[in-house]
Amino acid sequence: MPLKRRQFVKTTGIASLGLITSTFTACTSDAAQKVENAVTNTPALQAGIKDFGIQLYTLRDVINDDPKATLKQLADFGFTQIESYEGDQGIFWGMSNKDFKSYLDDIGINMVASHCDIHKNFEEKAAQAAEIGMKYLVCPYVGPQTSKENWKEVTDKFNECGAICKKNGIRFAYHNHAYSFKAFSGMIPQDFIMENTDPELVDHEMDIYWVVTGGADPIEYLKKYPNRFRLCHVKDRAKSAAADEDFASCNLGTGTIDFPKILAAAAENGMEYFFMEQERYDNSSPMKAAEVGANYLKQIKLS
């Protein structure tokens, strides 16, 4: 069975509260035409991002059946990088780390990072990642915490993971969700996380969709914490979504998020890796969503 969002969060062994549900609603239709229109009508969409990737969770409903065929199709779409996640077959999709890298080399894709369970065999994962030249291991989710003290425990754990990664010659990062931008106990958790993680040990992966959904401004955070956000998820938000609707992603270029502006600011403030991600599909398939996303990213100019 393909790994669903609730199962994925449970697999990581991190979340204790606010588990993600799989509430899916319709996104904007005629996605491909709208992407084409957006590209035509937006002056900033010109040169394109040279290297861009995809978070494999986008393909969760198909990748388990044939990981190699799925990855080959992604390469054909123009993706040159991937960020994996820890599903039923592990972050290397049933292969050894070296065999997985060898296959990716054959099809012209670089495995930059992977989301993973930071509470299970983390040192082993860091060693395996380093062995094949990966850059990052990423914590995907921690869930809302019940006290400031609990948030401090989270940041202490992140610093610990960062030290393990540094020892192995790679980096550690945390991927945000909307909850960390919601005021709590006199603070904004995301700011607390940024200020209590050691920049020498911990980077951050900005999920732009979740920043927007959490009511914050991605550009403000990029400028407030320059060179701290090194990876990002490029995930659009449907125009039809209600303000309080969490799960409203849609095909890239058809939603409300101004990616040309945000990604240009990201590049100016230290962003290095751009991964599209999508959690719902516009009356199409995961692979079609990936293809639309690749075509969109090819045309975004970062300067």
Image (cartoon, helix red, strand yellow):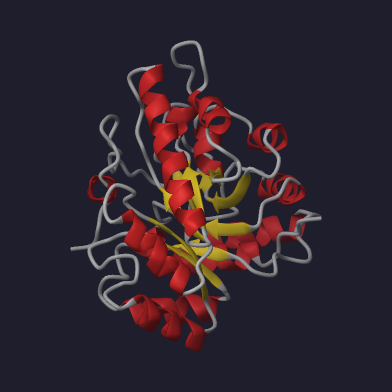
Q: Note whether residue 69 is visible.
A: no
Q: Residue at x 28, y 65 (%)?
A: 90
206 is higher (above) or lower (below) than 53: above
For this rendering, which residue is in front, 137 or 250?
A: 137
For this rendering, which residue is in front, 295 or 157?
A: 157
Is residue 257 rendered to the left or right of residue 136?
right
- Quick one: which residue is furthest to the front in this view? 167
Is residue 31 rendered to the left or right of residue 99?
right
**Residue 52 percent coordinates (x, y):** 60, 65
Q: Residue at x 47, y 36 (%)?
A: 241
Where's the C terminus, which quadrant?
Answer: bottom right
How many discs mark residues in the rendered view?
A: 0
- Quick one: which residue is furthest to the left in this view? 1
Where's the N terminus, which quadrant?
Answer: bottom left
222 is higher (above) or lower (below) than 234: above
118 is higher (above) or lower (below) than 36: above
Is residue 247 rendered to the left or right of residue 291?
left
**Residue 101 percent coordinates (x, y):** 44, 79
Is residue 140 rendered to the left or right of residue 290?
left
Q: Note whether residue 226 is visible.
A: yes
- Quick one: which residue is furthest to the top in this view? 186
Q: Residue at x 49, y 51 (%)?
A: 172
**Residue 43 percent coordinates (x, y):** 81, 55
**Residue 165 percent coordinates (x, y):** 47, 55
Q: Residue at x 57, y 67 (%)?
A: 294
